[in-house]
Amino acid sequence: MKTTTYRLKIKKALIITISMFMIITGNSKAINSDNMKKKILFVVTNQDKKGNTGEPTGFYLSEVTHPWDVLVNAGYEIDFVSPKGGQAPIDGFNLGDPTNKKFWDNTKYRQKIESTMKPGDVKTENYAAIHYAGGHGAMWDFPNNKELALIASKIYENNGIVSAVCHGPAGLINIKLSNREYLVNGKKVNAFTNEEEAAVKLDKVVPFLLESKLIERGGIFEKSGLWQTHVVTDQRLVTGQNPQSAKAVGEAVLQQLNSIEMVAKITRYEVKEEYLEQFKKTLSDYVFYALASKENIMAEAFYEQNKTNVLWLIERWNNKNQLENFNKELQGKIVTSLSNKALKNSIKTYYVKDLEPLTKEQWRTAAKKEDNQLIVMLFVDAKKGTQQNFKDRYHIAMPQFRSEPGVVTYQLSEIEGDDTLFVTYEKFRSNDAFQYHLNFPPIKPVLDYLQTSIKNPPFQNGLHNLIEFAPMTRE
């Protein structure tokens, strides 16, 4: 844990800096950097019977409440729509689940679910995401509802998120984008599996098997065993396997929403030797104050092991406005001013988009006292036409890399402006942990790609060994 002394130093230094900035600028008004967040639309079924069986069904309550809880706690407003509008039938009505009870006791949201909107009432521009809740009823009235499919395609093509859980992906199977391709075509997807349908003895009752239909539409189906939590995210499409996956779907949607707004920036400075220590101190101060800002996700500064006058600043903020506002404050101005005289060459800036992004808490995972960190950054210039192959290999390997005991942080990002350029950021607890990683079986397909499919081999030419000098916090 960070020490109390460190926290007090941050607070004291931050107060001093704010005071200095007010004196310098003569402006005591706080900058309001909070963004108004859009709404999220939840889709629920009106179907109250399982086909011709007479058995009751509806939307599965926890597949609404668990993602609802995650997203409402993050500040989002949830609206509800159903194919016919009005009251939506409920399945899985279990108030022993505290999240279900929390939802049901909320008068505002209980009224919303009892008087859902009709598709014609929806204004797509108001929504940042659309979520299809499951329950067997969805299998009958979701697939062929053209109005709902059009709503989802518009939200998606407006840079929004589409998510679904359990039988909710029945609403995805006929969504087409403006290029006339199915939304799920070529994307990794998940849903209630054929095995789970057989296990509940409804494989002969439902109008089709959802797993098979998604594969037929071009989806790349991923799954786990019966009733296991499994969530897949691919290109702003989030899908979950079963009721057990509902909360994780909400968390994945939130992460996607945050990543759309987030700005990630890597800056390279090549500094004249006579200014090196001064510039390092200036970047250290910048990182120090950035980390104290609630709008900041992460900030770190490094020098290159083999070229110590080359410094790197890596930072992520909730959105671009917050980054720009911070750089207008004292510490940003000091870096800019010193850069004008201290650099040998022009600043090199990369804006990047994280693939399968980390949370703020994950980015701020501190090293341990006993760690002898090894940090590498690898720039990859993929041959045109092979970049999706590169991302696919990392999609499989990344969760395994992040689970290695010696890995502190592992992130793959696209460099904005050229879809063939990538950068990895890899922080290991020690050289032994790095050597373990190089011999870890999941890395073999990645190394095979790097040795055969980049523009300018060997790939080691894009490798930078970094030494962290800010922050120097330890658990």
Image (tube, grey):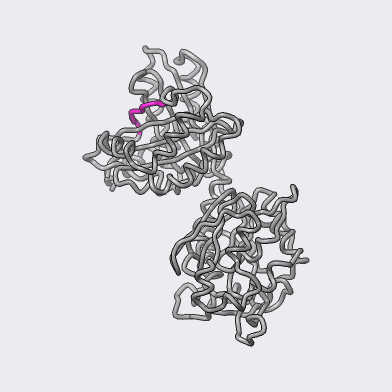
**Number of numbered discs overlaid on the protein picture:** 0
From the viewer's perspective, tell me whether residue 43 is left or right of residue 301. right
Nearer-the-camera pick, 133 or 327: 133
Query: Could one spot residue 292 in this view of the protein?
Result: yes
SS majority, magenta: strand
User: Which residue extends farthest right?
Assistant: 120
Quadrant of the rendered image containing residue 151 = bottom right
- In the image, taking residue 455 as reference, residue 207 lies left or right, namely right
* Residue 455 % position (x, y): 53, 24
Q: Residue at x 41, y 26 (%)?
A: 463
| Picture quadrant where residue 382 is located | top right
Q: Residue furthest bottom?
A: 54
Q: Is residue 290 visible?
A: no
Foreground residue, 147 or 316? 147
Reply yes or no: does residue 465 show up in magenta: yes
Residue lying at 44% horizontally and 80% vertically, measured from the top left = 96
Return the residue nearer the eye: 463 or 437.
Answer: 437
Residue 17 in the image: state x and y as whole percent.
Answer: 42, 35
Image location (x, y in percent) of residue 318: 52, 44
| Between 117 and 291, the one nearer to me in the picture | 117
Relative to 13, say whether 89 is above or below: below
Q: Residue furthest left?
A: 370
Q: Is residue 123 above or below residue 83?
A: above
Q: Position of residue 87 (x, y in %)?
A: 67, 79
- What segment carries the magenta color? 463-470
- Relative to 277, does residue 189 appear above or below in the rendering? below
Location of the C terminus by quadrant is top left
User: Per the image, is 402 magenta?
Assistant: no
Q: Residue at x 60, y 30 (%)?
A: 384
What residue is shown at x 64% (from left), y 70% (from top)? 208
